[in-house]
Image (cartoon, helix red, strand yellow):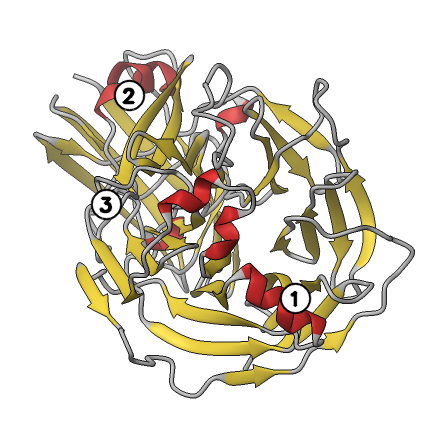
């Protein structure tokens, strides 16, 4: 029998926030990592809808972390395995008085605990894997909005031009994300990554070099991170190299979990990655059915890759070009979403794709022959071609026109593009019309939308969200 005792003691209190320290002595095992190695193959992550005295809380070995209130975290992660163990948990919380309650819980099939190894690469940041269990359940099924407008009146937004600083560059397939007071931009130019300070958007760092040499970027990708100590991850599609972008603007190579993985083809195969935990990523890549969502997780010295969801919609149509789109996720709400570029369809699902909700405005036919012609894809209507996944909502850049139509309107200086806003259960919230065309990101906390316009020098435009 393995017996673990977890003592949680208060170190500091400020209002409803508590800084606690957890100590976990191990019986019969020399370290927590040894125990995890023993039962790691049985891991299954679940969540509870409410927390009460008697539930096992999330703990980390000899690490400090914050609890959001004086009860317990709103989410727990569990190790589920078939063997029987006995766990004792003692915890102390501070209010006007110190309350201590010792719990003894016997589980025959599921034991709840979560430990962090001392290995630096496996240190869990506070709150990075907590899930909002109060968020409503996702309803499965397909919702048709053909010839319907679920958004109501379109809100037209007029942007404010942000004067440029000394940075001069050309936009090309840009992607942006915001972390705190910084905006990070990926661009198919040299250098491939730029860091700007908010709100004045002054360039403070450039990162990387464009090329095919070691540690250079030819097909770069920005990856949102659950690690609060870094700005984001950087990923190079041609060689599957992953880097941390630290807050000092320096890139640091990450050995795991993509070392030794293979590309599934360079064309239409740019991975769109989302970090969902420690050495745990989800991404979209080419597959035999066209495109699929995959999950890669580092376990020991091995990277386990599995297909989570097949994004193909027609067994006869297996071209990866047909299913190009935008992928995003919200691990705190156990949600991921995919919006198709050449179909006006969005799929919302949980991270295991057990519940799927399809938002179908109208399925346009993709011209299969267009993928074999020079610039042939421009014959197809571009629906969704940009995404910004935030805590409360997810935002999509929407065109609704062919690239040829966009060029004709631009020649008349008629610039515009739409942004659609949804909650994480697929409910339409609002549709905005911007007075410029370009690439976007959203600062949900400060209700700002930033557009990198392709029509003006600068190139930033700021929009105020309601």
**Location of residue 278 (image quadrant):** top left
Depth check: give the residue in front, 193 or 289: 289
Residue 314's mark? 3
- Label 1: how many residues lie within 10 Å, few (<14), some (14-19) or many (20+)? many
Q: Residue at x 36, y 58 (%)?
A: 343
> Mark 2 — residue?
40
Q: What's the distance in space between the residues labelled 1 and 3, CA to CA?
A: 36 Å
Q: Residue furthest left?
A: 108
Depth check: give the residue in front, 45 or 255: 255
In contact (CB < 8 Å): disc 2 and disc 1 = no
- Label 2: how many residues lie within 10 Å, few (<14), some (14-19) or many (20+)? some
Q: Secondary structure at mark 2?
A: helix
- Closer to viewer: mark 2 or mark 1: 1
Question: At which x and y percent is residue 250?
Answer: 74, 34
Quadrant of the drawing holding the N terminus: top left
Q: Earlier in the sequence, mark 2 or mark 3?
A: 2
Where is 320 relative to 175, above or below? above
Question: At which x and y percent is residue 452?
Answer: 69, 61
Quadrant of the drawing holding the C terminus: bottom right
Using residue 82 as the reference point, say whether residue 226 is left or right of it. right
Q: What's the distance in space between the residues labelled 2 and 1, CA to CA?
A: 43 Å
> Mark 1 — residue?
450
Question: At which x and y percent is residue 261?
Answer: 45, 18
């Amino acid at each position: 029998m393995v017996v673990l005792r977890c003592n949680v003691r208060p170190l500091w209190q400020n209002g409803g926030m508590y800084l606690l320290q957890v100590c976990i002595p191990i019986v019969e095992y020399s370290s927590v990592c040894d125990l995890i190695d023993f039962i790691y193959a049985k891991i299954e992550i679940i969540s509870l809808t409410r927390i009460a005295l008697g539930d096992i809380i999330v703990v980390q070995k000899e690490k400090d972390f914050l609890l959001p209130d004086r009860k317990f975290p709103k989410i727990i992660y569990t190790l589920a395995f078939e063997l029987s163990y006995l766990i004792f948990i003692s915890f102390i919380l501070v209010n006007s008085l110190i309350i201590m309650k010792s719990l003894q819980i016997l589980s025959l099939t599921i034991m709840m605990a979560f430990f962090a190894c001392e290995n630096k690469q496996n240190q869990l940041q506070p709150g990075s894997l907590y899930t909002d269990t109060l968020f409503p359940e996702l309803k499965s099924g397909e919702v048709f909005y053909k010839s319907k407008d679920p958004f109501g009146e379109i809100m037209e937004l007029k942007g404010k031009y942000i004067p440029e600083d000394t940075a001069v560059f050309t936009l090309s397939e840009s992607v942006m994300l915001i972390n705190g007071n910084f905006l990070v931009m990926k661009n198919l130019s040299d250098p491939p990554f730029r860091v700007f300070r908010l709100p004045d958007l002054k360039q403070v760092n450039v990162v990387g070099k464009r090329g095919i040499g070691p540690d250079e970027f030819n097909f770069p990708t920005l990856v949102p991170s659950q690690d609060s100590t870094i700005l984001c991850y950087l990923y190079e599609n041609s060689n599957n190299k992953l880097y941390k972008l630290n807050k000092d603007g320096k890139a640091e190579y990450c050995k795991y979990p993509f070392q030794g993985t293979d590309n599934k083809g360079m064309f239409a195969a740019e991975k769109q990655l989302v970090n969902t935990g420690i050495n745990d990523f989800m991404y979209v890549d080419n597959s035999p059915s066209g495109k699929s969502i995959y999950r890669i997780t580092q376990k020991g010295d091995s990277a386990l890759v599995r297909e989570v969801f097949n994004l193909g919609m027609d067994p006869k149509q297996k071209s990866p070009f047909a299913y190009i789109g935008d992928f995003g996720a919200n691990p705190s709400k156990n949600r991921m979403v995919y919006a198709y570029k050449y179909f006006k369809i969005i799929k919302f699902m949980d991270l295991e794709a057990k519940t799927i909700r399809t938002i179908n405005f109208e399925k346009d036919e993709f011209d299969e022959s267009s993928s074999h012609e020079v610039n042939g894809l421009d014959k197809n209507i571009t629906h969704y071609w940009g995404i910004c996944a935030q805590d409360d909502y997810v935002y999509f850049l929407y065109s609704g026109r062919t690239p040829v139509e966009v060029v004709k309107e631009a020649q008349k200086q008629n610039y515009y593009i739409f942004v659609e806003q949804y909650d994480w259960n697929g409910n339409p919230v609002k549709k905005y019309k911007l007075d410029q065309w370009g690439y976007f990101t959203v600062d949900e906390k400060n209700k700002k939308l930033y557009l990198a316009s392709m029509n003006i020098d600068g190139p930033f435009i700021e929009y105020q969200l309601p």
